[in-house]
Amino acid sequence: MLQQLRGRNVTHIGCAVGLTIGLLLGMFAAVGVIQLVASGAAVTLAVVALVGVTLGLGIIGFWVGWLFSPHGPAGSHKEEHEETAH
């Protein structure tokens, strides 16, 4: 599978996957915060949890996608592939 991704920019794919997982986990975290904190600040803390988890996993997904992109560490193999093709 990694051979298919080599040479492609997959940062946007990693970011999209990270944001999707972040939204799902962030919703669970927000509901958990609302259940645990039974006060007027519960909604504010829930929104902070949702945004924090979503952005955090989006950034992690972008970083992981960068690792598999041509300009990341996987890009060093691109030159080797081009040399063996000639």
Image (tube, grey):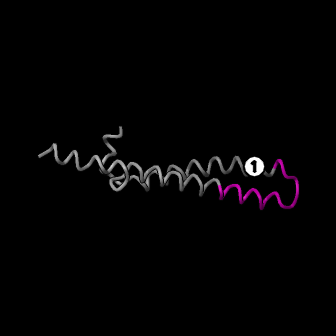
Q: Position of residue 85 (x, y in %)?
A: 15, 44
- Stretch in magenta: 35-52
Query: Within the image, what quadrant is residue 12 found in?
Result: bottom left
Query: Within the image, what quadrant is residue 41 found in?
Result: bottom right
Question: Which SS class for mark 1?
Answer: helix
Residue 51 falls inside the magenta stretch: yes
Q: Main secondary structure of the magenta part?
A: helix
Mark 1 burial class by Cα count in 10 Å: few <14, some 14-19, many 20+: some
Q: Residue furthest top?
A: 1
Q: Position of residue 20 (x, y in %)?
A: 55, 50
Q: Nearer the viewer, residue 27 or 15?
A: 15
Q: Report the label total.
A: 1
Q: Give the side of residue 22 with respect to residue 63, left or right.
A: right
Q: Position of residue 55 (x, y in %)?
A: 59, 58
Q: Residue furthest left?
A: 86
Q: Give the side of residue 53 with respect to residue 38, left or right.
A: left
Above or below, 51 relative to 79: below
Q: Nearer the viewer, residue 24 or 69?
A: 69
Residue 43 falls inside the magenta stretch: yes
Give the residue type that dot 1 points to: Val
Q: Position of residue 37 (x, y in %)?
A: 85, 52
Q: Quadrant of the N terminus?
A: top left
Residue at image position (35%, 40%) is: 2
Above or below, 5 relative to 47: above
Q: Give the side of residue 30 with respect to residue 86, left or right.
A: right
Q: Give the side of residue 82 with respect to residue 56, left or right.
A: left
Residue at image position (77%, 58%) is: 45
Residue at image position (48%, 53%) is: 63
Name the residue beneath numbered marker 1: 31
